[in-house]
Image (cartoon, rainbow, N blue to C red):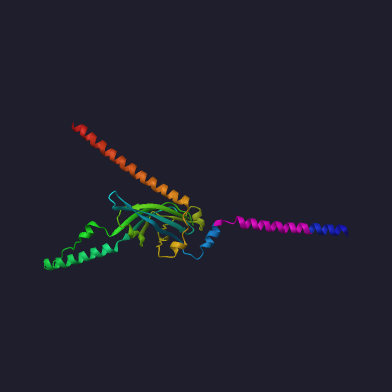
Amino acid sequence: MSNKRIFTGVAAAMLAGVCLSGARAQNINDIAAPVKNKVVSAHKGKADAVLFKVHDISSVKNTDGDVVACEFKVTFYNRSPKDISGATLLLSWKDRVINGVIDEELKRSDEKNKMNNDGRYVRATSATEKVTPIDVNASVDMPAIKAYKQLTLSSRLQSDRCFLLLGNTDFKVSSCSAVDNQSSMAMAGYGNSDCGGLFKFVSSKEPDYYKEFKKISYDEEKAAKRTAQEKDTQEVNKAYGEAVDSLNSASSILSRIK
């Protein structure tokens, strides 16, 4: 009887050990579950998109105090299962005030031409249109961005109308391709496709401007500033090199004349 009790106790202990081992295995599997699945589930029901917003806009003034350029940041959030290889975006802001002035000048010019040219067609002109473009444009090169990741770029454009960047922008996307991580063909290196239709501009008037984007860390901001500084340095070095080449060419021409 004693042996039976001992056997029963050992069997119960072994059974408990098996159950515990199974529970531990289950917990380990839970912990080892891919983080990506959790990220995907967090965005379930939301349309796939590469959201981007323009922020931190500032004016650059020359020594006379005149605004000559605008500096700003563009933050991209890839809210899709696709890895984006990179893209070029042409951003455009329309100055509706200038547009109205030009329209009014064209209208007055057209009426004047009809009165002074016996109804013959003469193209209407606008003095403002000749010196002030309606649109302010900037080209932004977005590097590769993984699915469900965010990045921030610093950019700059030559204009004295930085306030336009606070409004909506029209944009065109080029040089863009994507690989869908949820496609077996894409994982095998196939399935590249144009991804321009994924991009969506988010203005400060939309809830997603505050809800969808993560806060930018200090390290990310520091890296963005460093990239912008390196780009400025490259442009300055390029301009200096071109100036030196021009000077050398001029010196060579003068030496041959002598």
Is 233 located above or below residue 122 in the figure?
above
Query: Quadrant where the C terminus lies?
Result: top left
The image quadrant that residue 111 belongs to is: bottom left
Q: Is residue 110 left or right of residue 185?
A: left
* Magenta-drawn segment: 12-35
* Residue at horizontal 20 percent and vertical 67 percent from the top: 107
Please provide percent x and percent y for residue 201.
40, 61
Question: Is 31 in the magenta?
Answer: yes
Please provide percent x and percent y for residue 5.
84, 59
Question: Is 80 in the magenta?
Answer: no
Q: Is residue 153 left or right of residue 182?
A: left
Q: Main secondary structure of the magenta part?
A: helix
Please provide percent x and percent y for residue 137.
32, 56
* Residue at horizontal 11 percent and vertical 66 percent from the top: 116
Q: Is residue 64 left or right of residue 73?
A: left
Among all residues in the image, which is located at the extreme top?
A: 258
Q: How many marks?
A: 0
* Residue at horizontal 25 percent and vertical 37 percent from the top: 249
* Residue at horizontal 20 percent and vertical 32 percent from the top: 256
Seen from the viewer's position, the closer of residues 155 and 33 is 155
Please provide percent x and percent y for residue 84.
45, 54
Among all residues in the image, which is located at the extreme right?
A: 1
Seen from the viewer's position, the closer of residues 84 and 250 is 250
Query: Quadrant where the N terminus lies?
Result: bottom right
